[in-house]
Structure formats: structure tokens, C-alpha cells
Image (spheres, rainbow, N blue to C red):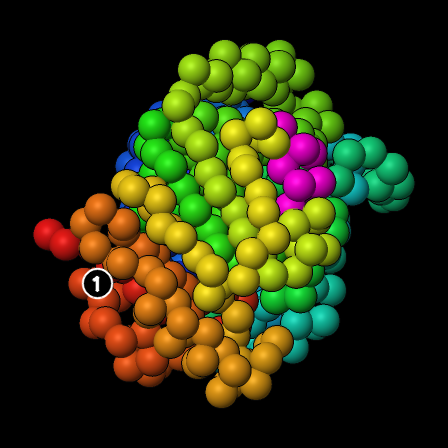
Amino acid sequence: MMQQSSYLLCCPCHFGLERTLRFEISKIGGSDIAAQDGRVLFRGNAETIAKANLCLSTAERVLIQLGQFKAYNFEELFQGIRSLPLEQWIGKDDAFPVKGHALDSKLHSVPDCQSIIKKAAVERLKSVYHTNWFTESGAAHPIQFTIRKNIATIYLDTTGIGLHKRGYRRNSNAAPIKETLAAGIVDLARVHSDSVVCDPFCGSGTLLIEAAFKAMRMAPGLNRRFLAEQWAQIPRTVWQNARAEAVAAIRHDAAFEAYGYDIDPEAIALTEENCRKAGVQPRIHLMQRDIADFEPIEHAITICNPPYGERMLDIQHAQSIYRIMGDVFPADKAHPCYIITPDADFELHFGKPANKKRKLYNGMIQCNLMSYYQD
């Protein structure tokens, strides 16, 4: 049966979260796991594909890697695609759009590469299905390609809309943090089922919601659908079983609680709405509060994404907030803090050196996750 076959899978992720994602993949049964810059490769079957889409909190999407070959010219690209067993996944009526990118390669025109790959895929499928015309009226099986240093890697996208779209944040305030990055920060902050978490700049509530998901073992993809759910090549029972297993794993008995503050009443209202959509509203307590009025909670983990000078406020104003944070955050073993910031001088303004710094990217912005605790 198809679901017992093993496939090479690839999950892109934020730079800096590879180890976190690798551990997540091991928990869902992935094997032969190899972390690279910005992605993790592993092997799994159709059940693994379903679990990966539903359960991985730091992956951007789940790709099936179909092949990899040298492509210095269009003929090599064409023949490389034509040699792939596309019919294993793409049916006679299925749609197979093509998109991708090229970097540091002789083949640098993305539109031309798309055209060649599409033609080669058509030729391959024509020879299998003995037809000259494809309606592409069925389920979408997007072909993705990367050509890097003249090596072409070809994937099928099983996810569709990126995995950071959990379904709870249809609206957001200015400068939100991406859900997958927030989940990675929550993991690095060592949030557990009995943790108390506080975010004094809660914005649209992303860090609080991802912390609740982590603590309660709620699969982040439970409230959305994925492209591969429509594929005839993966039985519907695979998805039904994966969803049932994810629902059964939720820890309703977790003692987790969280507190969110923001100076903006609209942010508080937005966070409350998103927490309700995410199904974690009873665990999260919200209040409009200025950072200057912050009162630390004993043994709570403070996790926050304070305002960035580049996006929302002028840099001087942002740095004045960092100074206030340094005054009101004890930042010790009883009050650990995890703060993501792009400001290279954050520690200077905060007034305390971080115990640990980890380089992360929030979109295209290079940041550091500043960890404050006593060993």
C-alpha cells in the first residue's frame, strides 16, 4: 500500500530553528533526519506526511523531494525532469503548476525554467497516460524547484498555504511575529505543560497562543486543511487517523496559564479574538497595561517581541522602551526572560548582558533571541 512506502521529505524552516524542527520530526516518526541551513530532510510514509502537516510547529511546509540532478543548461533540466516518476503522485486529471527560484546558477531565468519544467513534466505524463491533453481540473499537485549552484532539486508541495497560517490569526496588528518563529522561540524558552508565560507586548497574541499549543500539545494544524488531503494518492483514512490521533494527544489537564499585556486596547481585543479562534482563551488572561507598570510574576517565563525601531517606532523610542524593560524585568532564575530583537545594542539599553544569544530571522530582519536566566 502507498502509505507504507518511504519518501524523502523536506521541511523548510526559519534559519536558527533547524535543531528544534529536527526534534519535532523525530517525535512524529521521521527517520534518517538531516538538518541543513534553513531546512530539514527526513524519510517518512504517507502517514508521516499527514502528521508533519498537522503537528510540526516550526516547519514552513512539507515537501516531497522527487529528485536532484545537475542542470547547467535547459536540456539537462528537461531530461532531469523527464526522468522523474511524476506519475507516482500526479494523476491524469491533476493540476501541476510550477514555481521556484534559481541562485548562483547558469540557469537564472525563473520563467524560462518554469516553462522547461512544465514541458518536461507534460512529456513524461503524456508517455504514461497516452494523451496529448491535460485538463488539470483535478487536485493541485504543485511542483517546486530550486536551482542552486547548478544543482536542481524538484519537490511536490503537500501543504499549500504555508504552515504558519494556523487559522487563528486572520487579522493582525503592525509588525506581527510569524507563528512558526513564535513556536520556535516558545520551544527555546522551555515552555512545559505546567509553565506560566507572560508577554508584556502581546500584539495579536501569537507568542501566547503558540505557548498554549506547546504546553497543551495542541497540533497547530488542526484548524486548517492541506493540499494533499485532496490527493487520490493518499487515502483519506490516513488524514482522518492523523487528526484523531492529534485530538487525542491534547493535554486538557495541563496546568498552563498565560498573561498578556499591551498598551493598545485594540491589541488586547485582537489577542482575545485570536485566542478564542485558537481554542485557548480560558488559559490566557489579558489586560491593557503600559510596560512601565509591568509587575513580574514569580517563576513565570517572560517571552516577548518588543517594538522594533525599523518598523513601528523611531529607534530612539524603541531603545527607551528597552531601558524601561531593564528596570522592570528582574531577568533572573526566578523570572527568566526571552526577548527577540534586531537591535545589536539591546543589552546596552536593557542594562544587563544576556546569558545566551541565538541568531534568528524575523522575516528578512536579522535578530537575536536574548535569553536571561541564571545557570
Q: Which residue is the site of mark 1?
A: 356
Please provide percent x and percent y for residue 103. Answer: 51, 75
Task: Kindly indicate the quadrant of the structure image that contains residue 91.
Answer: top right
Residue found at the far left of this picture: 375
Residue toward you, 87 or 168? 168
Residue 119 visible in image:
yes
Please provide percent x and percent y for residue 116. Answer: 69, 64
Identified at 53% across, 70% down, the residue is 307
Identified at 40% across, 72% down, the residue is 324
Residue toward you, 244 or 80? 244
The residue under label 1 is which amino acid type? Lys
Magenta span contains residue 275: yes
Residue 7 visible in image:
no
* Highlighted range, magenta: 271-279
What secondary structure characterizes most of the magenta part?
A: helix
Please provide percent x and percent y for residue 280. Answer: 58, 30
